[in-house]
Amino acid sequence: MLLPHPDRDRAPQRIALTGANGGYGRTFLAQLACTPEILPAVLVDPDTDGVRAMLAELSDSPQRTAEIVRGGGIALVTSLDAIAWEVLDVLVEACGKVPHGTAYAASALENDTHVVMVSKEVDTVVGVALHARASAASLSYLPGDGDQPANLLRLLDWVSAVGLDIVAIGKAGEYDLHFDPATGTLTQAGESIDAPALRDLLTLGEDVPATLAARAEAVAQLKRAAAADSCEMTVVAMRTGTVADVESMHYPVARIDELADIYSAREHGGLLMADGAVDVFSALRLPGEASFAGGVFAVVRTGDPVTWETLRGKGHVISRDGRYACLYWPYHYMGVETPLTVHAAADRAPALPARATTVLAARTVRDLPAGTQLAVAGHHHEIDGVASVMLPATTDATAYYLLDGARLLRDVPAGELIHESDVEGIDPLARDLHHEGRELTTTETTTKE
């Protein structure tokens, strides 16, 4: 049963979707069958045959097709040059590539079209400048609901509206660590290892950092940290002023009911050196336990002890000493949620501005010789031989995802940051907008001082 909702009575909004044949694109297009006020007028992807095949699967009858497009047509195009902006209201940018996504979003804003930014890689590089340009033109530039950054920002809006004191925010890694004590087997995203040591580490004990260190050692064979995680948390940091407690984030192996203890101050037995940290954890669960589903969380200070002990009794996550609580949303539904952002863009809903307070930089993990071609690749959108690190924007290093397609001009030893002067082949539009954003933030800070 579909309940009636006022959004169904909206005037039609015609959208363009880039990266239409990607996983995110499909989940969004499938949901549009239930939101007929949003019309997918232009689908952009080099693989138009793949888009056609996907649409055929989604539209398995004339009636289904009518529900999706409301009697209109869908234009399948391969590039920016073929987009007619005058017939569009909103761009949903989901191609995931900085040069292309930057060009799509900048062109949309130049042509009086709102932008919903799903490509977090693009946002970390040029989001500050694009947000400023959108504001100047009375347009919307918003991170897309359904991915963790926008979901976490929604949670934080609720937390701040209530008036809770935030200590740490973040999300779970994309895939849970599923541990079977009976066999000692640990599984993550289909990969299994023997980790019998976890049997004795299922509770935090008195020394939280020591337990977390032992858990990390027990699961060391698995890749848990990902550039995509750092990218998403940079999107949030740019809008909240939060920072990474350590440049690569802590990534504790944690059970849900432990989060309020883990993300507490070091003086209270937790990990944090200071308030306002953004982080990612690996969710550890046993057979039959619910997943965190890559969801988002906020750890806050508690107030009245009686109130929070009452909430503990109702199953809420409160630290053992009663000082901290963890509020969380255990989900992110990809394109299923993105219609919310399309509506918000059309409404010009207020949004936190993006500021260049944090840079997602690149630190080499091995010696890289001059001539090395840097390219973002793989499921986790990473550059081989280079780790993503979250640093203050004053750091003299260039943005991680600005390096996609660049070539090293000098030998860069392991452990060094990569600077713009170290490479050639950076996309000029993305580079210029990146600098524009940093200059805007510097000017804003200087003006306030």
Image (cartoon, helix red, strand yellow):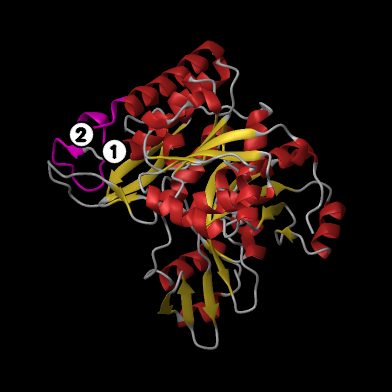
Q: Specify whether residue 32 is in view.
A: no
Q: SS class of the residue under badge 2? A: strand
- Number of numbered discs on residues: 2
Question: What residue range appears in magenta?
Answer: 407-428
Q: Earlier in the sequence, mark 2 or mark 1?
A: 1
Q: Name the residue type under label 2.
A: Val
Residue ID at (35%, 39%): 401
Image x and y of residue 6, in percent: 80, 39
Badge 1: residue crowd in 10 Å (few <14, some 14–19, many ≥20): many
Q: Which mark is residue 393?
A: none
In front here: 271 or 59?
59
Image x and y of residue 36, in percent: 68, 43
User: What residue sits right under mark 2 in the picture?
Assistant: 423
Residue ID at (76%, 48%): 302
The overriding secondary structure of the stretch rendered in magenta is: loop
Q: Are marks 2 and 1 in contact (CB under 8 Å)?
A: yes
Q: Name the residue type under label 1.
A: Leu
Q: SS class of the residue under badge 1? A: helix
Q: Which mark is residue 403?
A: 1
**Left or right: residue 414 compared with residue 47:** left
